Amino acid sequence: MRAGAPLQGTVPICGAKNSVLKLMAATVLAEGRFVLRNVPAIADVETMSDLLRSMGMHVERAHRGHDVTIDRPAEIVPEAPYELVERMRASIVVLGPLLARVGRARVALPGGDDFGPRPIDMHLKALEQLGATFEQSHGFVEGRADGLAGTNLLLEYPSVGATENALMAAVLAKGTTVIDNAAREPEIADLASFLNRMGAQVLGAGSSTITIEGVDTLHAVEHTVIPDRIEAATFLAAVGVAGGEITLEGARADHMDMLIEKLSDMGMRISPANEGIWAMAPDRLRATDVATLPYPGVATDYLPLFVAMLAVSDGVGIVTENLFSGRFRYLDELTRMGADIRTDAHHAVVRGRPQLSGAPVRAPDIRAGAALVVAGLGADGETIVRGAEHVDRGYEDFVAKLHALGADVERG
Ligand code: EPU
């Protein structure tokens, strides 16, 4: 891709990857036919579909559409094989539903990834407190539960995955469960509204205290997935770097308050529009400092996008990554594009330049890959991003959508 004309037009925002994967896992909890709407056509959804199929479930996407039908038979195989967990560590969210509904689960241990270590200790501790027991051997964790019982859970940290596993287990536990210091992400609230539609009794999701009254059975339902705030953020960053004016169709500004606040500090004009978000970039962004925090703070997934913007902003910005220790690897790739970045542990100082210099770079993960593409929109000459399959894990038609907004970008 090359720097080119400012972006212009409307881009449709897909359903949220980090919501739909958990909703798919939750279908383990009840027999019958589920229909999920607004499901993005991305590789991670394919991996979760393969995982459900490997358990004996039937998963089908309507031809070229965003509706996915999942048939959950009476009997399923409560196992997540290594080859699928290795492809996508979010597979671990089947653990809670399997224990709650089948009473047994054998799930490959996810191990670390490109961000550094990704432990599941909080998932296991919460499920143990609900009455499950675990053994680990040969790279698998095997869990058993002879009927879970509601209890008070206090998470050491508001982990998204641990909150989701505990929530999906607690809906079928006997009695009341309270999850304190729960993650507050909009995707957790979406999961709770899906579970409630299935017959669960969940209160307070989206706040840091979630109360669950266990029920005996749940039933299959239809549900529309919330829009992907990270995909929306990616297009906001793209217009910030390339300039222009765009509308994000279907995006929800109320899920992105802190991001919008930060981008406004950088000089962007952003407002809720008819069923979406309208955004206009200034001639040049102003630098700001950014630190990642659990929701409603600045999401760790946004940080590579901020660095790409700061690299061409006016001034100096300090970014701080508080969640994933290994997430700074893409900084070296941006430096190859001429970005002026100094790192010290989990801080990076980014001095803005008027323009970056196009270069071949490698995407280390989904979000960093998208950020390198965004950076390429502000770079002189050609940028080639290798490892685009990482981007495919989380973005549907990313290149085609950018191209439709007028970006000079193509898929090799
Ligand atoms: N952690 C532990 N022990 C645990 C669980 C988490 O120490 O048992 C630590 C992690 O190592 C990390 C922090 O807690 O330092 C936060 O992890 P969290 O559990 O909140 O993250 P996650 O559930 O593994 C989800 C998203 C990530 C997103 C994070 C943070 C999905 C599938 N993934 O991961 O999204 O970055 O929350 O918001 O929902 C992405 O979409 O590209 C992505 C990586």
Image (tube, rainbow, N blue to C red):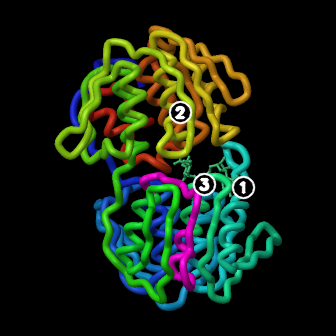
Q: Nearer the viewer, residue 337 or 259?
A: 259
Q: What span is colored magenta in the figure?
A: 167-187
Q: Amino acid at mark 1?
A: Pro
Going 34% across and 51% down the picture, which residue do you hit?
227
Q: Which residue is mark 1?
A: 119
Ligand 1 near label 3 (Cβ, under 8 Å)?
Answer: yes
> What secondary structure is found at the residue carrying circle 2?
helix
Mark 2 to mark 1 CA distance (whole Å)? 21 Å
| Residue 189 falls within the magenta-colored stretch | no
Asked where in the image residue 132 lies, by quadrant, the reply is: bottom right
Q: Residues within 10 Å of mark 2 (few under 14, many from 20)?
A: many
Res. 303 mark: 2
Ligand 1 near label 1 (Cβ, under 8 Å)?
Answer: yes
Q: Position of residue 199 (x, y in %)?
A: 38, 80
Residue 28 seen in this snapshot: no
Sooner in the amino-acid sequence: mark 2 or mark 3: 3
Q: Amino acid at mark 2?
A: Leu
Q: Position of residue 344 (x, y in %)?
A: 72, 23
Mark 1 to mark 3 CA distance (whole Å)? 11 Å
Q: Position of residue 43 (x, y in %)?
A: 48, 55
Residue 187 seen in this snapshot: yes
Q: Residues within 10 Å of mark 3 (few under 14, many from 20)?
A: some
